[in-house]
Image (spheres, rainbow, N blue to C red):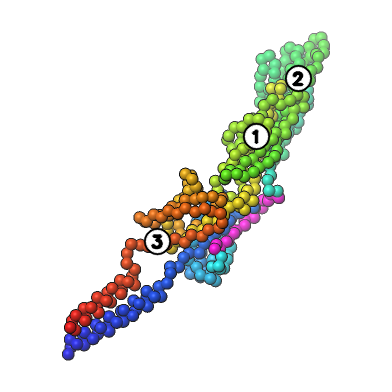
Amino acid sequence: MFGKIIKMVMVIIAVLTFILATVYVVNAGPPILPVGIAGEITINGEPIPDGYSVIIKNLNSGETVEKFTKDGFFVAGLSAVDGDEIEVSISYNGKAYSNTTVVNTSRTTQWINITIIEENGEDDEEDNTIKINEKPVVVIPSSFTGKTGECIIFNASQCYDPDGRIVKYEWLFYDYPPFTLHGKIVNYTWNHPCNIIGVLTIYDNNYSTNMKTFSVIIYDNETNGSNNITFPSMPPVANFTLTNSYYKNNTLYVNFTSTSTDPDGYIVNWTWTIDGKLYYGENITVKVPIRNVNASFIKLNVTLLVTDNDGMYDDVNAFVTLNISYLNSEKYHLIIYSQKTVNIKIMKSSDVVMEDAGKYFDYLLPEGNYTIIYAYKDQVKEERINLNRDVEIPLEFKDNKTPLGFEILIIAFMIIFMVRKWRG
């Protein structure tokens, strides 16, 4: 009798186990995919530098992730459902900034931007601007006169720098032989009559320079005779303008034209230094690869050095800001998401466009054919796409093991089988 009771209890346990396993498998449903969170952090309209920590938090569930800014942007994947409130926060210059949004899963990406306004910040009103570093201003007489044996004073104390300070004064005298003096106020005594050219070059704290040519006329002290006055050569004035820019094959082509002038002659040489690369000619075209597809602006450090027919020179330095946000109309979103953390490599022809790791990816890429390689543990998938519209790609990787629900079913069947065998 006792044995029959034991068998009956085991049958009941097996039936209940089977029912629970069936309910588990039926109600398991598809995996919950993360929600894409993205945004841009700007400071006075400019992207925040790379590497700033961004904290993204689901205020309902408490789940928190940390990402770092790259070209002003951040992208993250976070578990959430409709109505959850997401907070993004960042610390900059000792102050905390944050913004929130409410999740709407009908949107592919939940955008949360943070705008930081600093005092004395200025937003560019134009798309393409040239910001000139103001050069120091030379204020000295056009000529200095004196007699042999007298001390001639050269005073540059009236020179100034509109946006900084002067750090160096260099006086060059084309005597026989030439010589140089340094200082805001210098003096020199000639023991022979002469009529020579001098050049004062001043340097400011931003590495900008300016110069002025002057004459030095020394009369004979004994005869008080006069010298023929000659006018020294005048240096050129360097300047340039951005004449055109156009986009092709992931490259921005920028045209620069010199507008430099020479008061007493003509310019014979134009030397450009743009982000460390040298170019030559009155008109040049610079190729700028667009490596960051999410960037809104690029900046070029441009220096033009011109030399005139008298061998004199002048230079100008400027930071050129180019708005490339209009290129976004020629790009498309490639959105990839997965329940598992995967490694992704995106290639165009033989070039690697992007390498990344995570659960959610949102790229803005130019139209074209791409090869995408996904890797999860020892599983590797490869896919080729023609990106001519916005594309979403859900990924599904399975671990090489039997799901828990099926394990329970197998155990239940084994218990039923054993019970039936014992009863038989």
Dot 2 falls on a residue whose secondary structure is: strand
Q: Which residue is mark 2?
A: 216
Amino acid residing under circle 1:
Ile
State the image coordinates of residue 82 (x, y, percent, origin top left).
Answer: 53, 71
Q: Which residue is mark 1?
A: 284
Q: Residues within 10 Å of mark 2 (few under 14, many from 20)?
A: many
Question: Magenta span: helix, strand or loop, mainly?
Answer: loop
Q: Residues within 10 Å of mark 1 (few under 14, many from 20)?
A: some
Dot 3 falls on a residue whose secondary structure is: loop
In the rendered structure, find residue 397 and report the number of the disc placed on it: 3
- Residue 152: quarter of image: top right
| Mark 1 vs 3, N-terminal side | 1
Left or right of residue 394, residue 424 in this image: left
State the image coordinates of residue 284 (x, y, percent, origin top left).
Answer: 65, 34
**Residue at point 54%, 66% (across, down):** 86
In the rendered structure, find residue 218 and report the number of the disc placed on it: none
